[in-house]
């Protein structure tokens, strides 16, 4: 038995149907497909040419960005696994065992400071055990306080929301 999950194909068949609800917003298959195609282009531009033969682990929040990343990887034929973001040392060690068993070579972690720290810990753990693993911390935080980043996705939308809310609140003063 085999099943193909394609957001792009679903968008062709029923573009206006609701695909999912995330962050309090409903997204149609057409909207999710557009986001997936955009993320696929980003992955194609940044991942090595041989990434399609690798397994990828994605750790992220239960949010739209993580879902889009997963669908984008799947559409590109790159297996991906969603893992809980608060893994402890014993769980990270087990994670490395699973990576080794499934030949996972890429680890993308979407989030803020804690996520970047965890990606670093997993990278060091892999190096300690001599396991070749590329760990990438994908910045996404409204705090905009990650080292070596000018601006994190999430910050601009939070800043705009705050500015608009303050402006609209002034109407009632």
Image (tube, rainbow, N blue to C red):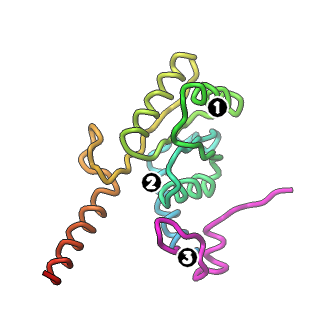
Q: Residues within 10 Å of mark 1 (few under 14, many from 20)?
A: many
Query: Element type at marker 3?
Result: strand
Q: Nearer the viewer, mark 3 or mark 2?
A: 3
Position of 159 compared to 106: left or right? left
Disc 3 to disc 1, C-alpha distance: 34 Å
Residue 8 drawn in magenta: yes
Labelled disc at residue 28: 3
Q: Nearer the viewer, mark 1 or mark 2?
A: 1
x and y, in percent, of residue 150 in the image: 24, 47
Tell me the quarter of the image containing the C terminus.
Answer: bottom left
The residue located at (50%, 69%) in the rendering is 34
Disc 1 to disc 2, C-alpha distance: 24 Å
Point out the stretch of residues depicted in magenta. 1-27
Q: Closer to the N terminus: mark 3 or mark 2? A: 3
Labelled disc at residue 154: none
x and y, in percent, of residue 105 in the image: 58, 33
Labelled disc at residue 42: 2
Q: Say if 126 sits above or below 73 in the image.
A: above
Q: Closer to the N terminus: mark 3 or mark 1? A: 3
The residue located at (29%, 56%) in the rendering is 155
x and y, in percent, of residue 118 in the image: 46, 33
Disc 3 to disc 2, C-alpha distance: 21 Å
Viewer-closest of 131 and 173: 173
Position of 35 compared to 172: left or right? right
Q: Say if 18 sits above or below 56 in the image.
A: below
Query: Element type at marker 1?
Result: helix
Residue assigned mark 1: 99
Whether tag 3 and tag 1 are in contact, CB under 8 A, the answer is: no
Q: Residues within 10 Å of mark 2 (few under 14, many from 20)?
A: few
The residue located at (20%, 79%) in the rendering is 168
Residue 12 drawn in magenta: yes
Q: Say if 134 sits above or below 20 in the image.
A: above
């Amino acid at each position: 038995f085999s099943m193909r999950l394609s957001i792009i194909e679903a968008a062709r068949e029923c573009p206006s149907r609701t695909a999912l609800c995330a962050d309090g917003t409903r997204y149609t298959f057409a909207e999710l497909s557009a986001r997936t195609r955009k993320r696929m282009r980003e992955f194609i531009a940044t991942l090595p040419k041989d990434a399609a033969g690798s397994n990828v682990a994605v750790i992220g929040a239960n949010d739209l960005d993580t879902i889009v990343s997963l669908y984008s990887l799947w559409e590109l034929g790159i297996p991906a696994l969603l893992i809980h973001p608060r893994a402890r040392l014993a769980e990270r060690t087990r994670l490395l065992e699973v990576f080794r068993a499934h030949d996972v070579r890429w680890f993308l972690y979407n989030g803020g400071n804690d996520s970047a720290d965890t990606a670093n810990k997993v990278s060091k753990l892999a190096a300690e055990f001599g396991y070749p693993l590329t760990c990438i911390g994908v910045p996404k935080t409204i705090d905009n306080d990650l080292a070596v980043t000018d601006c994190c996705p999430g910050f601009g939308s939070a800043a705009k929301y705050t500015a608009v809310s303050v402006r609209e609140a002034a109407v009632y003063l």
